[in-house]
Amino acid sequence: MTSTRTDRWLHLDGTTNTRDLGGLPTVDGGETVFGRVLRSDNLQTLSEADVATLVDEVGLTEVIDLRTTAEVLMEGRSPLRDVDSVTHRHFTLLPERGRRTDVFAAEEDDEELLAELPADWVESLLPRQVAAGDEGEPPAVRSYLGYLTDGTDNVLAALRTLAAGGPGAAVVHCAAGKDRTGVVCALALAVAGVEPEAIIADYAQTAEVIDALVAKLRTHPTYAEDMTRRDVASHTPQAGSMRRVLELLDERWGGPIGWLEQHGFDADERAALRARLRD
């Protein structure tokens, strides 16, 4: 993957929504570099060819998983977990329920562990979080602000992993690769100096594959109910949702950088994250 590449989509057998964060314009006239950070939906259905593409061609060395412990336990491990050169980190942005939170300390096929999950844990997989004072915002905006309120430490941890990693590529993912992944990637791109409209466009780009993405998730019992209870349009990311989140960050914190600064993501960390996406 070179700096001259213009197609940001990475077409794999086992994912629907994998793309590179390279090639995005920055406010100083530059652009982000290809082959540094990818964003994606679930990785557990990757084929052998997909693994070879990611590891040998892209140079993947890190997976940052934003799903809940329950999602990982019920969906199963990614074949990338068997690749010694790839490090996995788990940072859920949603409130955890149950006694176990360190998913990678246990085997996902442990039936005894699965039996320990509360009966209503499946229902809590994709909650619509509402931060105090945000009740009047659209549902997606409320959820995204909820990640920043309830998942602050793990949002920062995910960004710190990106900042400290390399020289290989990292992939940030959740279930669909649009909401939780979208918020973390938006903050990373803001640190890299990407133009706000390009951040918004990257978020909304998932709409290009939303039909196939929803169809795929409907085949997984973990997500089937949520995928069928609402129509495809309600799952489709709207540019206005991310635009509103950025507006609120501007109003309340002086922008994404202000939010990060005031939550302890310091100048050295921001410089390292910027360098990973830019230099």
Image: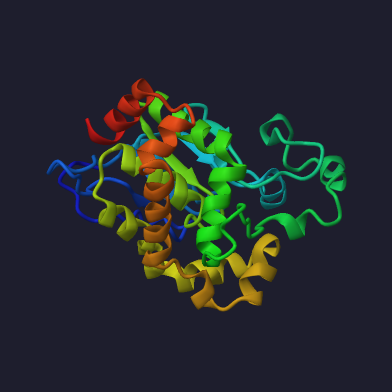
User: Observer-nearest residue: 200 or 106?
Assistant: 200
Residue 48 position within the rendered picture, expressed as x and y whole percent measured from the top left: 49, 47
| Scheme of image coloration | rainbow
Quadrant location, the N terminus: top left
Quick check: 66 left or right of 200?
A: right
Q: Is residue 214 above or below residue 144?
A: below
Quick check: 216 left or right of 246?
A: right
Name the residue rendered at 46%, 43% in the picture. 172
Quadrant location, the C terminus: top left
Name the residue rendered at 58%, 51% in the picture. 146
User: Observer-nearest residue: 154 or 69?
Assistant: 154
Q: Is residue 144 above or below residue 263?
A: below
Name the residue rendered at 34%, 23% in the picture. 267
Residue 263 position within the rendered picture, expressed as x and y whole percent measured from the top left: 49, 31
Whether residue 167 is visible here, answered yes or no, is no
- Residue, far top: 268
Quick check: 170 left or right of 143?
A: left
Residue 271 position within the rendered picture, expressed as x and y whole percent measured from the top left: 30, 26
User: How many labels, in total?
Assistant: 0
Quick check: 245 left or right of 132?
A: left
User: Observer-nearest residue: 176 or 261?
Assistant: 261
Residue 59, picture quadrant:
top left
Q: Is residue 13 above or below residue 154?
A: below
User: Observer-nearest residue: 201 or 69?
Assistant: 201
Residue 171 position within the rendered picture, expressed as x and y whole percent measured from the top left: 43, 41
Whether residue 240 is visible here, answered yes or no, is yes
Name the residue rendered at 67%, 33% in the picture. 104
- Residue, far left: 29
